[in-house]
Each structure stands twice: as structure tokens, then as C-alpha cells.
Amino acid sequence: MRIVLMSDTHIPHRARDLPAPLWAEVESADVVVHAGDWVHVDLLDELEQRSARLVGCWGNNDGPALRSRLPERADVTLAGVRFTVVHETGQSKGREARMAAAYPDTDVLVFGHSHIPWDTTAGSGLRLLNPGSPTDRRRQPFHTYMTAVVGAGSLGEVTMHRV
């Protein structure tokens, strides 16, 4: 199973649309995961139409229209791997231990908010992934998103893509 992970798209405030390479990934993926800060419901509508399956949550910049359609926390099992999708995880210091304690029944935690790509594993085995932002790099050198492969109950290759 091929998964696309994104967050912090901020459309239309930071960009008019997602980059073309990301749309190509969306259309070929089995699952698309968005970890919040969509900003406008139009992107949600379009991702729902162009994705085979969409899993997402709302972020701090998402208003009532998005919050009425998305959860604050999304939990899903994909190919035997338990994913949780949230927007915020707090400060980076101590993140792995805090998130392992907060999500003991999760294998992979996908989050956003900082726009800083993150890929670490907590002592408990919890994998923490932040795909960065494909539209608002802030102080990062590149716009980014991630892809991952999941199968037979395990998370395989995770790739960070620069846009």
C-alpha cells in the first residue's frame, strides 16, 4: 500500500494549489494523509475527489467548515499498521517520549504544525512523521511532503520529497 503524507498546505493563503508532482502522487496513491492546516474547504473537496482514500484532521488554522468535516485526531489501520493523525504535538524537546505516552496503541504518528520535516522513532517503537509543508517552507530550505509504503503489518520505506 502506497501512502502520501502532507500537512500545512495553507491553501489559498500560501499557495493557489498543491504542486503538480504532489497531485500526481495523490492520484496514484492508495491513501492520502493530511495532518491539518488546510485553511479552505475547497482543498478538502478536491482531495476527496482525487484520492482513492483520504484520512485527515483539522489544524489550528482551520475554521468551522473544516472542523465540522474533520476530526481533531484521526485513527486508522492500514495494512495492519495503526496510524494516528494529529496536527500539533508541542515542542520538539521530549516529543518522542511524550507522544509514546500519549499514543500507546499507535504504530505511526503523523503530525504537522511546525512545517519542519521530522522522522524519528520513540523508544517504544512509535514512528513519528511530519511531512513538512508542500506550500509554505517557512525557514526550511525546501517545500516537502512524504510517501510511505505499508504492508503485512509494517511500515516500509518512508521517503521525503522536495518540491
Image (cartoon, rainbow, N blue to C red):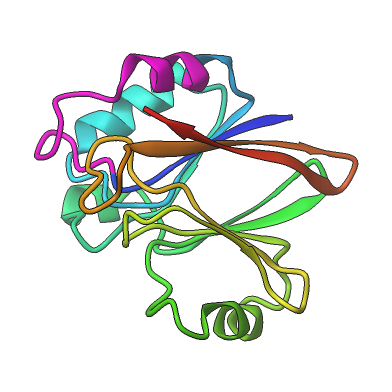
Q: Quadrant of residue 107?
A: bottom right
Q: Quadrant of the N terminus?
A: top right
Residue pictured at 59% horizontal, 77% vertical = 96
Q: Give the farthest residue toward the front.
A: 141
Residue pictured at 52% horizontal, 85% vertical = 94
Q: Quadrant of the C terminus?
A: top left
Q: Nearer the viewer, residue 144 or 72?
A: 144
Residue pictured at 75% horizontal, 79% vertical = 123
Q: Nearer the viewer, residue 67 or 162?
A: 162
Secondary structure mainly formed by the magenta segment: loop
Q: Which residues are magenta?
A: 9-26
Residue 58, position in %: x, y?
33, 55
**Residue 153 falls left or right of residue 85:** right
Q: Quadrant of residue 60?
A: bottom left
Residue pictured at 32% horizontal, 23% vertical = 46
**Residue 43 falls left or right of residue 21:** left
**Residue 10 falls left or right of residue 36:** left
Query: Is residue 7 highlighted in magenta?
Result: no
Q: Nearer the viewer, residue 80 or 137?
A: 137
**Residue 40 falls left or right of residue 57:** left
17 w.r.t. 113: above or below: above
Residue 68, position in %: x, y?
28, 53
